[in-house]
Image (spheres, rainbow, N blue to C red):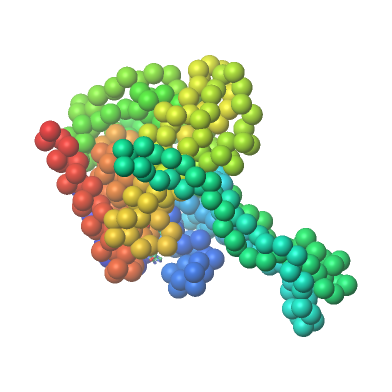
Amino acid sequence: MINLLHGDCLEQMKTLDDNSVDSIVSDPPYGISFMAKKWDYDVPSVEVWREAMRVLKPGGHALIACGTRTQHRMVVNIEDAGFEIRDVVSWIYGSGFPKSLNISKALDKAAGAEREVVGKRVRMGDSKSYSSDNTKSLKCTSEDVGDITAPATESAKQWDGWGTALKPACEFFTLCRKPLSEKTIAANVLKWGTGGINIDGCRVGTSGATKKVNTEECRESLGKYGDGLNGGTVSKLDAGRFPANLIHDGSQEVLELFPETKTGSIKPHKNEGSSFQASKEITGSHKGDSGSAARFFYCPKASKKDRNEGNNHPTVKPTALMAYLCRLITPTGGVVLDPYMGSGSTGKAAVQEGFSFVGCELDKDYFDIATARVNNEEHLGVRREDL
Ligand SMILES: C[S@@+](CC[C@H](N)C(=O)[O-])C[C@H]1O[C@@H](n2cnc3c(N)ncnc32)[C@H](O)[C@@H]1O
């Protein structure tokens, strides 16, 4: 079942039944007026989260993306609506660019003083090329990205090297839960199918640690845990790492933060492809809990593929990341809700994982992109099952 609703999520969610979805996975406005977008002027209100909680089954989990500067406002509203805050999943990455004001330059500019050019700033990179026999070669490249200048005034010399912001390297997903309706988790999962986290389905570091489900049967189910189980097969489930509240992007910069040990070998990769492919490259013996970055799920920022599907949304989340998050908190054959679906990354991911999906989006252009992406994924799934 796919139900895409165009309009304000507070109004749209009012059309949904009480206790009708199994999880919420969402990337709402962070309230930082990103790229001067009107839709990002504030974090969602307590009222919105109250409505989302009404729709969610008791014991159902939500994973809500938050930015570093406004996560406190986001989480307070979620908590004030009645959710229990259970954890924070941090996603760390190396590709962020610092938006820091150079105070020394600002002082010289204010004084009208000209700075002497003392060098060139160069960005190093590499480019791929292919010869006629299709052999790939890598060439180091360098690109001029501006002048290096010396401070001119006394105050600029004093403040040389000072700025106003750090390099962004993480985003958070607040993990929260609607209070149970029953006295125990055991009674709650039996009544509603919600209350648990899919540990084995999200173990990390082995290619077989994923529960494969028959998506056709899951889609026909009403989403209660067990409804889709008959169609589910456990394929090659082997012991991977226990899923952690840390996810990284697999970039060289981030991998260097983790000590390499005998229990894990790391092969860094380029910022492309899906985490499922990529996780095969970062492997280890997975014994004990020491080791390297191999013990954590990793997913690069949105790939070109994610953006290529006619998708011009400025804050696209990677499908592979959203798929992992959906799988972590949604019972087999369950319904995922995203009240702020943007270009539909959560919806596409949910369908890929064999879940039903309900999504809301205010902006018509983004709504159309989301509709195309989610429906396309649904058709691909049906075609795959036909094979
Ligand atoms: C951070 S973006 C989500 C991006 C999404 N994760 C993706 O991969 O495309 C948040 C979205 O929420 C939408 N939005 C903002 N306020 C809304 C509201 N009241 N109801 C529904 N959607 C809203 C915005 O138009 C925006 O597309």
Looking at the image, the residue that sits furthest to the front is 132
- Residue 197 in sight: no
Looking at the image, the residue that sits furthest to the left is 386
Instruction: Name the residue at 51% across, 30% down.
Output: 267
Q: Quadrant of residue 122?
A: bottom right
Q: In the figure, 376 relative to 239: above or below?
A: below
Q: Quadrant of residue 179?
A: top left
Front residue of 386/359: it is 386
Front residue of 200/315: it is 315
Residue 56's x, y, as percent?
36, 48
Residue 162's x, y, as percent?
77, 62
Quarter of the image where ligand 1 sits: bottom left
Q: Which of the image's four quarters has the C terminus?
A: top left
Residue 118 lies left or right of residue 307; in this view the side is right
- Residue 278 in sight: yes
Instruction: Name the residue at 47% across, 48% down.
Output: 127
Residue 300's x, y, as percent?
46, 44
Residue 252's x, y, as percent?
56, 39
Front residue of 296/130: it is 130
Instruction: Name the residue at 25% across, 24% down.
Output: 233
Q: How many marks?
A: 0
Residue 375 lies left or right of residue 350; in this view the side is left
Q: In the figure, 195 relative to 96: above or below?
A: above
Front residue of 359/221: it is 359
Residue 150 lies left or right of residue 285; in this view the side is right
Looking at the image, the residue that sits furthest to the bottom is 112
Instruction: Name the residue at 29% across, 22% down.
Output: 235
Q: In the figure, 86 relative to 166: above or below?
A: above
